[in-house]
């Protein structure tokens, strides 16, 4: 890829000021190089209408990851999606074809097929001609500019009734570089995808290692060196009291999440729908455990490294001085403990289940009575968490890098040498 030269920096500054740099032209998709070619999708694709067959794998298009690379497992299909016995009702999709979900293309459910297979009758299959390099189009059609165009061409009374049929897809305009430049851009972005995939594989392995450690250390199957004392059974009401302190509006707002734990509310990329009157919000202190009263049966609880206030929809646990709260925060993530939370939650259906403190306190857990062993186990698992967090941050940086590369390369702001 071309390096970020002073010429490129100047070009970016011109575009930010609304100017048209030399050699560029304005199009419906924004500024593009003057030597790129303008087409409609109908110029570069033909609708493929071949039936599926038994030997072909069933493919699926995801908003987040494009077309699946091979057979989709039945368990991974959305609940409302049922496989059709008569495979001839499916549509054949050949490697290099562009496929999209007619009902969700406006959300980004579009991509290039990498493995020949078949797709749902609710998909459109488009066969490319020699004007395009298929892998380039996999990235190009998933840019925000193209998704916006697809959205405008989709028709329906409401968003969830929108459909993109072939006759609406074909007129959509696009501006493309030469095949050689398409290939070079696709190679750069594919390399970046491989970097992300490798690091995500390492993350999954670290998560498996942590899960194994939890299963061994939090059940007593494996003991850390130097520890061999007895374990005991105790009701949680003997280990935790409920903290019900209110009128602490001066403290920062916190949120209790399933993945990130307890974090400042401002770090969540969500609209703040909280009440202006925070007088009934609950204080949570460093070392407390907070849980979502309505979702404790799903494992939404965490140890707090912050002092602040949280919604009254949460329950705050103040630990006894004789235990290590972080150890119990990990214990509360064990499947068998989460099942106990489910059993003791009250509600006619899952959506109304809640675990209030009066029921939480009745639950009996089995744990090591040695607080030093609790601390040692918590430190081992915290070290595993730190490795996982660093990998997550690294992956997020790589994804942002890919996003920047797509923005620069797929618009021609940065040109590649071919």
Image (cartoon, rainbow, N blue to C red):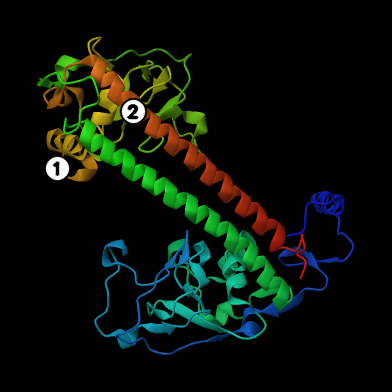
Considering depth in this image, is 90 or 260 the residue closer to the camera? 260
Of residue 361 and residue 27, the one placed in the foreground of this image is 361
Instruction: Locate residue 281, reporting x and y percent.
Output: 37, 20
Is the residue under label 1 in contact with that under label 2 (CB below 8 Å)? Answer: no
Q: Quadrant of residue 181?
A: bottom right
Q: Residue at x 20, y 23 (%)?
A: 357
Residues 371 and 410: in front is 371
Examine the rendering and report whether any part of residue 265 can be seen: yes
In this rendering, the answer to whether 225 lies above or below 114 is above
- Other-residue count near label 1 (Cα within 10 Å), few / some / many at <14 / 14–19 / ≥20: few
Vertical comparison of 157 with 262: above or below: below
- Measure the alpha-carbon separation of dots 2 and 1: 39 Å
Q: Residue at x 26, y 40 (%)?
A: 212
Q: Is residue 324 left or right of residue 36?
A: left
Which quarter of the image is occupied by the C terminus?
bottom right
The residue beneath circle 2 is: 380
Q: Identify the residue at the far right of this view.
A: 22
Residue that sits furthest to the bottom in the current view: 50
* SS state under label 2: helix
Q: Which mark is residue 348?
A: 1
Quarter of the picture holding the N terminus: bottom right
């Amino acid at each position: 890829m071309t390096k970020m030269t002073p010429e490129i920096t100047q070009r970016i500054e011109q575009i930010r000021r609304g100017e048209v740099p030399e050699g560029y032209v304005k199009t419906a998709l924004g500024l593009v190089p003057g030597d790129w070619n303008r087409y409609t999708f109908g110029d570069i694709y033909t609708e493929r209408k071949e039936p599926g067959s038994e030997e072909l794998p069933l493919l699926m298009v995801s908003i987040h990851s494009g077309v699946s690379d091979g057979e989709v497992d039945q368990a991974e299909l959305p609940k409302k999606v049922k496989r059709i016995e008569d495979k001839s009702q499916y549509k054949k999709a050949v490697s290099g074809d562009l496929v999209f979900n007619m009902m969700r293309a406006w959300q980004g459910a579009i991509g290039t097929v990498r493995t020949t297979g078949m797709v749902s009758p609710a998909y459109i299959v488009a066969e490319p001609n020699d004007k395009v390099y298929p892998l380039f189009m996999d990235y190009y059609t998933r840019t925000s500019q193209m998704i916006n165009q697809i959205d405008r061409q989709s028709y329906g009374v409401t968003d969830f009734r929108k459909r993109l049929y072939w006759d609406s897809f074909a007129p959509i305009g696009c501006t493309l570089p030469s095949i050689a430049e398409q290939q070079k851009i696709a190679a750069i972005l594919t390399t970046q995808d491989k970097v992300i995939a490798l690091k995500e594989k390492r993350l999954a392995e670290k998560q498996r290692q942590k899960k194994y450690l939890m299963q061994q250390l939090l059940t007593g199957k494996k003991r850390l060196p130097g520890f061999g004392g007895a374990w005991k059974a105790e009701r949680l009401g003997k280990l935790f009291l409920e903290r019900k302190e209110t009128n602490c509006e001066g403290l920062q707002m916190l949120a209790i999440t399933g993945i990130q734990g307890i974090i400042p509310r401002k770090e969540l990329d969500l609209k703040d729908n909280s009440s202006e009157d925070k007088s009934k919000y609950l204080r949570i202190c460093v070392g407390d455990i907070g849980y979502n009263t309505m979702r404790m049966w799903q494992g939404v609880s965490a140890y707090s490294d912050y002092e602040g206030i949280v919604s009254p929809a949460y329950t705050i646990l103040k630990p006894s001085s004789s235990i290590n709260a972080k150890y119990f925060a990990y214990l509360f993530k064990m499947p068998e403990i989460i099942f106990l939370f489910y059993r003791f939650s009250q509600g006619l259906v899952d959506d109304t289940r809640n675990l209030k403190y009066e029921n939480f306190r009745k639950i009996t857990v089995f744990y090591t009575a040695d607080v030093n062993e609790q601390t040692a186990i918590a430190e081992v698992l915290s070290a595993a968490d730190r490795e996982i967090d660093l990998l997550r941050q690294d992956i997020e940086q790589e994804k942002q890098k890919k996003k920047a590369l797509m923005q620069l390369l797929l618009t021609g702001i940065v040109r590649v040498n071919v």
